[in-house]
Each structure stands twice: as structure tokens, then as C-alpha cells.
Image (tube, rainbow, N blue to C red):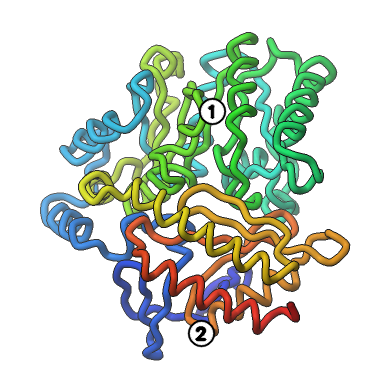
Amino acid sequence: MTSLSPLLKQATPVVVDHASGSWIHATDGREYLDFTTGIGVTSTGHCHPRVVEAAREQTGRIIHAQYTTVMHKPLLELTDKLGAVLPSSLDSVFYANSGSEAVEAAIRLARMATGRPNIVVFQGGFHGRTVAAASLTTAGTRFSAGFAPLMSGVHMAPFPYAFRYGWDEDAAVEFALRELDYLLVSRVAPNDTAAFLIEPVLGDGGYLPTPPAFLEGLRERADRHGIKLILDEVQAGCGRTGRFWGHQFSSVVPDILVTAKGIASGFPISAIAAPVALMSKGWPGSQGGTYGGNAVAAAAGCATLDVIRDEELVENARLRGDQLADGLRVLQHKHPVIGNIRGLGLMQGLEFVTAAGDPDAATTTAVQQATTRHELLTLTCGPAGNVLRLIPALVVTEHEIDLGLERLALALADATND
């Protein structure tokens, strides 16, 4: 009997029958409040009626219109709608299927445009699982171990992880920028460096917001040295942080922006955006792909962007994110095993530590499993596996946040002795 690969590990035992909004209805009749949203993908909630209808209608017109062969209207419309939310300077878009593909397209463009080989990434970043994307990923060895050699030309600098260092944010930023400068004089010559690549909020690396001052320091150094700044907005984008893009808490505008996940509410589509002048420096034939910019996914993307705008979901993410963060701080006060609460909008993380301050992955896993028993779906992340991440849909209600906090409180009581 054929089965799924044993390497695939499910975070929960749930088998879904159907889902709607913030709720997953399992085949055993139980109903789960979903604070995972497919790892931040179902931004407008499960099966939003407008997204469902857009996909259904497009399926009846054409499913696969390979966009380097024939163009289709949904992709043109999606490009126009993205233009309304992208920084105005990023006026050219290339579409792919997944975040990994889009990240690889971004670094390919940066290398071609600059004629330089090196990419600088930052400790804890996650950029994908394909060979090049895994080579750029430092959110855990499980993403890059066992299939060396990886792509060359990748160099890592520290991330301003204030809680880990035991410093305040300003001190962490000063340290990380100083170490980046040292890397640029000791190991990676600026005139050999094509790009800095960073997430505005680390995803699998632990749900750590990148301090605005650090992004601004990267922008200044990129401008000074002719280096391209690539922002990986795959998980932090599309309203998740309470701004449409995660980098908008700073004054920074990237040279290349990468997006995927929440852009189409569950349909596979990704993109990079850059100025036309920069995009034009890519070599002819360097962009393409059989399924990139699929017509049904593009139609779902159009509907998703319309729903985010019409239902004011970015503002809802801000309000419900503040509500969630306030509730998490109350729980932290009751449970010393929660060492740190952080996040932006509906992208919140709880870092669990031992009494000695070391990462406590065992408790994190126990809490995550207990939330499932209390019909709240959550996930873990972080290089040490000691961060519980909460990713509600952008449509989540005030009542659902309160209910989620109640169920998390029960799970914490079950899983800890606090």
C-alpha cells in the first residue's frame, strides 16, 4: 500500500473535512480554531466566498495559460492590483509558484544586475528548501544539512536578536551593524557583494521583528556600496503585521521585494517586484517557468487583494494583533517559562526557556500538542524549536482572539507546572 513519505511530520493529528474562516472542521466532528493558517497562507481565512467564487469562475474559463506563451487577464489584473500596494518604485513584477522560487529569482536578478557573486544573509533567516534557497537559510540545520555541497557565495552576519543576547534593542542593532561592517572588511568585499537578503520579521527563525534601525542601517550600507537590498516578505507581507508589508515599520524601500504565501489565500503563486530598470538587467531567458502565474491562482490573488482592501483587513490585523499581544503578556506574567513575547500584528511568537535561560523545546512542544487537545491549532519554530507561533487569519474576530487565548491558557496549564 502506497503512503506519504515518512519524512513528512504532521504537527497535529487533525484530518480536515472542511474549513471556513478561522475554523477547521475535522473528519471526527471536532472543530478547531486555526492559528496556523497553513503557515500564514490563508490570509482571508479558509474558503473566503469571494476567493472561492473567483477561482471557480476562472476554472471554467481557462486553468493553465502558460504566461510566456499566451497572456491571460487575471495576471494582468493582479499586476495592477499589486501595483496599488507595492512601493511606487517597484514597478515590474515576475511571477513564480513558491517562495523558494521567488527568492532564487531575486538573487539571480541581483547577481546578474551587479555582476557580483556574493549574498549576505542574516542569522535565523528562512528563505526556502530548494538548494539555493536552503543555502541562504540559517533558521535551523534541518533545512540545509545532509545534501552538501550547497550554493557558494553565501555569507552570514548576525541578526539583532536582543533577547538571545540579553541586551536592549539598540545595543543589539549596534552590535549587528558593527559585525556586518567587520564582515565587509574581513571576508566579503563590498564590490564582490550583490545583495543583502533579510526578512522584515524572521519566520521559521523565531518570529523576530527586524528592528527598523537595523533595516535602515542595511539600506545605508547597500546604497553606499552599490549592493541590492532584498526583502523577503513571503511570510510578513500581505497585511500580516498590521501594515501591508512588514518593512513599512521603517523608512526603507527595498530594491527587490519577494512575496508569496498570503497573496492568494491558499493558491500557489509568488512574485518578485523591482524597478523596471533593475529588472531589465536580468539576462534574457533567465525568468520563466511552466506553472508560474497560473490563471486560477492569479484570479484568487486578485480576489484576495480586493478582500484585504474592502474588509480593511490590514487594520483588523493591527487591532487584533494588539489584542493578542496584550493577552499573551498576561499569560507570560503567569508562566515564567515564557521568556519572551514578540511579533507584529497577527504574527506573534512565545519563546520558552528553562530556569537557567536556555531554550526549552520540550515545553514548547508540549504546549503545542496541548493546544491541539484544546482545539486550538498552533505551530512551533526557531532554530532550537522553542518558539510557539500564532498566525491567525486576517479575518479573525475579537471573540476568536479571546477564545484562542482561553484555549492557550488551558494548554499552558496542562503542559507546565507554572
Check the image and report above or below for 43 versus 283. below
Q: Which residue is mark 1?
A: 230
Name which residue lies at 75% across and 58% down: 384
Q: Position of residue 98 (x, y in %)?
A: 44, 46
Q: Quadrant of the C terminus?
A: bottom right
Residue placed farthest to the bottom in the image?
28
Which three-letter amino acid code belongs to the residue tagged 1? Ile
Name which residue lies at 64% across and 77% down: 412
Q: Name the foreground residue: 59 vs 259.
A: 259
Q: Is residue 265 left or right of residue 256?
A: left
Q: Position of residue 230 (x, y in %)?
A: 54, 28
Check the image and report above or below for 363 versus 141. below
Say which quarter of the image contains residue 184: top right
Q: Is residue 283 left or right of residue 91?
A: right
Q: Is residue 71 left or right of residue 315?
A: left
Q: Is residue 322 left or right of residue 352?
A: left
Q: Which residue is mark 2?
A: 1
